[in-house]
Image (cartoon, grey):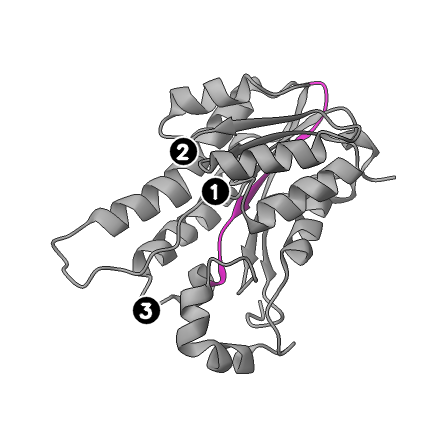
């Protein structure tokens, strides 16, 4: 019932060919939403479009790194139907460089985790119709809540998304709700290096004693872009097995 409003309308998913993005796209397709998948990996885009295009949903894939505001507006112009949701999943996860004079990781972290979400959200707010309430979901991280000592650039960018959520929920109200998810360790391949180094220690700190699955994050996003969350805005929601309380 709550997903009925998604049928025949477009949800934009950046990073849509990644682990969580793929799980979300499949759930959206089951709800018969139209989907605009944005990702820098063309082969994964093509595979997902072929898979989901066999159902009732219209599925469009766009290869883009969302480098600036104008590019974001151009991407949104490819929506196959009326816009109803934007899910900002795109991002990079890199360890920091020891040399403080080398800012390349910092600059990539801010550009690909924070700036692109800012630009996509502003472009979406400009183009979203005023005939219904649209939804934006940001993606922060457990790192923003705890601080990752060897990923401080990533931590800073993801913390910025929590603040951006608070600001945009006020800026875009009342026509758009804006919320943010903060996943813990999710089995997508992205945290493989960290898990190889200290996976057992990290798992031991999680009250549920396991890592999350992409589908478990996607289901929370589905709630946030549905009418079930019609009075939820400006919230940062942890999906981390109980690691952060509050």
Question: Residue 62: horizontal and vertical position, in percent?
Answer: 52, 27
Quadrant location, the C terminus: bottom right
Q: CA distance from mark 2 to mark 1?
A: 9 Å
**Viewer-nearest residue: 99 or 175:** 99
In contact (CB < 8 Å): disc 2 and disc 1: no
In contact (CB < 8 Å): disc 3 and disc 2: no
Which disc number belongs to residue 114? Answer: none
Question: Residue 9: horizontal and vertical position, in percent?
Answer: 72, 25
Residue linked to disc 2 = 65
Question: Residue 199: horizontal and vertical position, in percent?
Answer: 48, 76
Q: Is residue 34 visible?
A: yes
- How would you rate the neighbour count of disc 3 (Cα within 10 Å): few for under 14, some for 14-19, many for 20 or more? few
Question: Residue 123: horizontal and vertical position, in percent?
Answer: 49, 24
Tag count: 3
Residue linked to disc 3 = 149
Q: Residue at x 40, y 66 (%)?
A: 193
In contact (CB < 8 Å): disc 3 and disc 1: no
* Tag 1 secondary structure: loop
Magenta stretch?
130-142
Residue linked to disc 1 = 90
Q: Is residue 133 magenta?
A: yes
Ranked by sequence position, the earlier of labels 2 and 1 is 2
Residue 178, compared with residue 128, is above or below; it is below
Q: Quadrant of residue 33?
A: top right
Q: Quadrant of residue 96?
A: bottom left
In the picture, measured across the screen, residue 41 lies left or right of residue 99, that is right
Q: CA distance from mark 3 to mark 1?
A: 22 Å
* Tag 3 secondary structure: loop
Ranked by sequence position, the earlier of labels 3 and 1 is 1
Labels 3, 2: front one: 2
* Tag 2 secondary structure: loop
């Amino acid at each position: 019932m709550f997903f009925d409003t998604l049928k025949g309308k477009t949800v934009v998913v950046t990073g849509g060919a990644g682990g969580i993005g793929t799980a979300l796209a499949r759930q959206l397709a089951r709800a018969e939403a139209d989907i605009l998948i944005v990702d820098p990996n063309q082969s994964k885009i093509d595979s997902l479009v072929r898979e989901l295009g066999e159902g009732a949903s219209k599925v469009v894939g766009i290869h883009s790194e969302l480098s600036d505001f104008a590019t974001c507006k151009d991407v949104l112009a490819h929506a196959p139907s009326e816009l109803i949701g934007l899910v900002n999943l795109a991002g990079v996860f890199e360890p920091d460089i020891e040399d403080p004079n080398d800012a390349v990781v910092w600059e990539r972290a801010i550009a690909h985790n924070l700036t692109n979400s800012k630009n996509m959200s502003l472009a979406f707010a400009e183009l979203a119709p005023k005939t219904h309430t649209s939804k934006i979901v940001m993606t922060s991280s457990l790192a923003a809540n705890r601080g990752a000592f060897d990923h401080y650039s990533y931590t800073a960018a993801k913390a910025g998304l929590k603040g951006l959520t608070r600001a945009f929920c006020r800026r875009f109200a009342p026509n758009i709700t804006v919320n943010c998810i903060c996943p813990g360790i999710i089995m997508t391949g992205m945290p493989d290096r960290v898990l190889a180094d200290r996976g057992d220690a990290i798992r031991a700190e999680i009250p549920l004693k396991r890592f999350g699955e992409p589908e478990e994050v996607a289901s929370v996003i589905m709630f946030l872009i549905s009418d079930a969350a019609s009075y939820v805005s400006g919230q940062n929601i942890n999906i981390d097995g109980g690691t952060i309380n509050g």
